[in-house]
Amino acid sequence: MGADDGPVARWELAGDGRNGTDGGTQADVRGEVTYGADRHPRTGRPAARFGGAGRFEVALPAAIAAGDLTVAAWVRLPAAPTTVIGDVVSWFDRRDRRGFTLGFEHGAPCGSHGNDRMAWFGADASTVPSTQDLGRPGSATIMVCALAAFEGALYAATWEGGPHPRGRVYRLEHGAWSDCGSPWDANAVTRLAVHDGALYAGVSRLRGGGSGLDDSANQAPGGRILRYRGGTSWEDLGQLPEADSITALVPFGGALYAAPMYSEGVFRLAADGSWVDCGSPGRRLLALGVHRGALYGAGNDHAQVDDAIAKTKAGVVVAARSTSGGGGVFRYRGGQAWASCGLQPDTTQLYSVETYGDQLHVGTWPTGLVFRGDDGVSGAADTAGGGPRWTSTGRLGDETEVMNLQAYNSMLYGGTLPHAQVYRYDGDDMWTPLATLDRTPDVRYRRAASMVVFDGDLYVGTLPSGRVHAIRAGAVASADRALDGGWHELVGVRHGATVRLHVDGRLIAERRHADLTGPISSTGPLTIGGGPRAGFEGDIADVRLWDRALDADEVRTLSG
């Protein structure tokens, strides 16, 4: 049977979107979608433009996705994304982790933009996650501060110890780490960003006391941004004003933004190579992130918490209850203007910013809570209805700091301090512990310090062991490189325990999970232009669904 024998459902996304191939598969629009914005240049089929808020929902018989399946869509990404790009087609139930998603990873879980326009296709059937140790990038690595997927390879940025420590960047090749050089004479490379076809690094003079360690023998200042030139070569792009450290390096709207760690301010890289002052919300920021058309900063403000921070006899730091709140989330409004999006109870610092379920989530210190932004957080409604509201989604075990939040295979994951643990968010206020990744004895703090999606797994870097681990949940096939802004056909195939991702007729990645054997059909609607993580930003045309696995020749025929 060939691909021309036809899918079981097809949506052209024209008019009101109610044009499925049979009476049981019409799509109902939710939110704002622009019709007829363009047509696909080869097929001539109409395209719908999504801005992150609109989507189509389709009621499908569960039998369609009970076994093998293929989903295909033509997509075009925006030239300058202002969201996390989001999900293209999804039929996934977050309550029992069952279903499939075809989408993109694009974001900055802890101030590093490790995934840039990366297409992926994943499926799960409530599989049990597994963990693999990928080793220590360098012999003197203390912390893997940042991870990034760039041009099909994994890069790790490190804080180094030893008698002459200089932060370095390493690349994972065939299971081994190769040295990409030291961008600058500072003890750490703290942030990475993939932007505009290049890999960028931010270097820092890290203070050991914040991690319960001695200060470094190398006290050379950082605060600079550099661009990778290949081999061990790096190009200096200058220093942020009055900065000796970098806490965030994030692209937004086509430009690269950076923030220092120990001082205030946010800066944008201009076309002439200078750093433009974008102002300050009035306090230090510990991370930057993108959500629904805006750039956000995660704040650090000890003064907002009334009650003292106390140490328990176990050495775990906790905070007494506070009614005033602290931390603070701020939205950039252009120029040097920032708008407050509210404070979070029992919080002094925010370390991570992530979009999940179309809502902004932030990870906190010192109570290890994750808050979800509800009313008035995004858009222009800073004060509408009484102002922004932050809702706790629960605490990650007994942990005190949530360093990372990362969407992976349609679920949300968090990495913590002081025990370097990884948790999965299972809804309501339930965070399920999956792994303890650093068991270094006789230390005060252990961190799950960095996260990225690469090669179908969730990669996590640690402190103080300085190792990288891979967590696999379900099966994910990922492109591991940025997709450009032209039209591309994405095809996801589930064939038994294997998933495959094809881009423009070429097999890009294939992954298998031995336990992915049961039905993956969801009880909810199939969603076009959205999914568990977020609504899609860009154009979609000609979505098709087969109740079987197309082979490679059939997929090539689709793309012509």
Image (cartoon, rainbow, N blue to C red):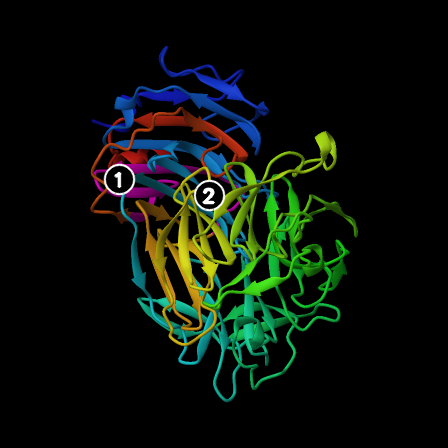
The answer to whether 222 appears left or right of 529 in the picture is: right
- Horizontal and vertical percent for residue 390? 61, 41
Residue positioned most to the top: 23
Res 458 quadrant in image: bottom left
The mark that comes first in sequence, 2 or 1, is 2
Q: Which of labels 2 and 1 is toward the front? A: 2
Magenta run includes residue 494: yes
Q: Quadrant of the N terminus?
A: top left
- Residue shown at 56%/76% (left/top)? 208
Q: Residue at 35% x, 12% y: name it.
A: 22
Task: Say which amino acid is labelled 2.
Answer: Phe
For residue 76, side relative to residue 9 (left or right): right
Mark number for residue 552? 1
Q: Amino acid at mark 1?
A: Ala
Residue lying furthest bottom: 163
**Picture quarter with the C terminus:** top left
Callout 1: SS? helix
Q: Is residue 484 magenta?
A: yes
Residue 11, percent from left and from top: 42, 21
Q: Closest to the observer: 205 or 13? A: 205
The boundaries of the magenta stretch are 482-510
Q: Which residue is mark 2?
A: 104
Prevailing secondary structure class for the magenta stretch in the rendered image:
strand
Crowd rating for badge 1 (residues with CA inside 10 Å; few <14, some 14–19, many 20+)? some
Judge whether residue 437 can be spotted in this image.
yes
Front-lying residue, 393 or 172? 393
Q: Nearer the viewer, residue 327 or 163?
A: 327
Between the C-alphas of marks 2 and 1, the distance is 22 Å
Residue at 44% over, 75% down:
443
Q: Is residue 269 visible?
A: no
In the structure shown, which secondary structural element does the residue marked by tag 2 occupy?
Answer: strand
